[in-house]
Amino acid sequence: MAGKVLSFLVFILFARALLPTNFGNFVLFVTLLQLITYFADFGLVQWYQKKAATEDRDELLDKVISARIVTLFISYLLSLIFLLLSSSFNLQTSLVFLLALAPEAFLSIFDGYYLKRGESFTVSLKTLLRMIFLFFVFLFFTSSFSFEIAISSYTVS
């Protein structure tokens, strides 16, 4: 809950600091990243959680990671096509977007791993720590906060 509240506050700060177009592009960036990650997971997290009770968890995790690498390359290809056809972002932002797909892909897989081990607190820390980082980046760059800083800090977080 703390992560969601802080996320709400950070997005308000970003909305107040960025021009409306830039904030809209930031939200588009985050939304596309999350949607593509969700669809590229292709049910792997649920499959892992279902099979983990009967199979060796570490061996099963290796299989899921291998499958996620394949879906990551497919999502790279489809994202590249979408970015080229839609012209949603400039070249620099598109490259940052494509770079951000990899960590998001593996973070989502490890969410399932930790949830199956009963470590939901570890999973909930992801949003909280990301928002704390973004909040401090915002404070540090308040006078020169820009779209580029927003997407770069989101990607790094």
Image (tube, helix red, strand yellow):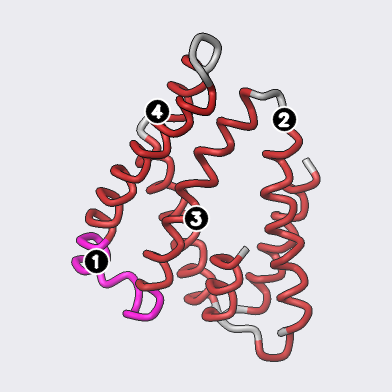
Q: Say few, some or many: other residues with alpha carbon within 10 Å of mark 3 (under 14 / 14 to 19 / 20 or more).
A: few
In the picture provided, is 118 more to the left or to the right than 102? Answer: right
In magenta stretch: residue 3: no
Residue to which mark 2 is pinned: 119
Residue to which mark 4 is pinned: 43
Q: Secondary structure at mark 1?
A: helix
Q: Is residue 133 above or below residue 36?
A: below
| Label 1, label 4: how far apart the Cα atoms are | 27 Å
Lower position in the chain sequence, tag 1 or tag 4: 4
In magenta stretch: residue 83: yes
Lower position in the chain sequence, tag 2 or tag 3: 3
Lower position in the chain sequence, tag 1 or tag 3: 1
In this orientation, which residue lies closer to the viewer: 67 or 20?
Answer: 67
Q: Are marks 1 and 2 in contact (CB under 8 Å)?
A: no
Q: Nearer the viewer, mark 1 or mark 2?
A: 2
Residue to which mark 1 is pinned: 86
In the picture provided, is 44 more to the left or to the right than 149? Answer: left
Q: Secondary structure at mark 3?
A: helix
Quadrant of image for the N terminus? top right
Q: Are marks 1 and 4 in contact (CB under 8 Å)?
A: no
Q: Say few, some or many: other residues with alpha carbon within 10 Å of mark 4 (under 14 / 14 to 19 / 20 or more).
A: few
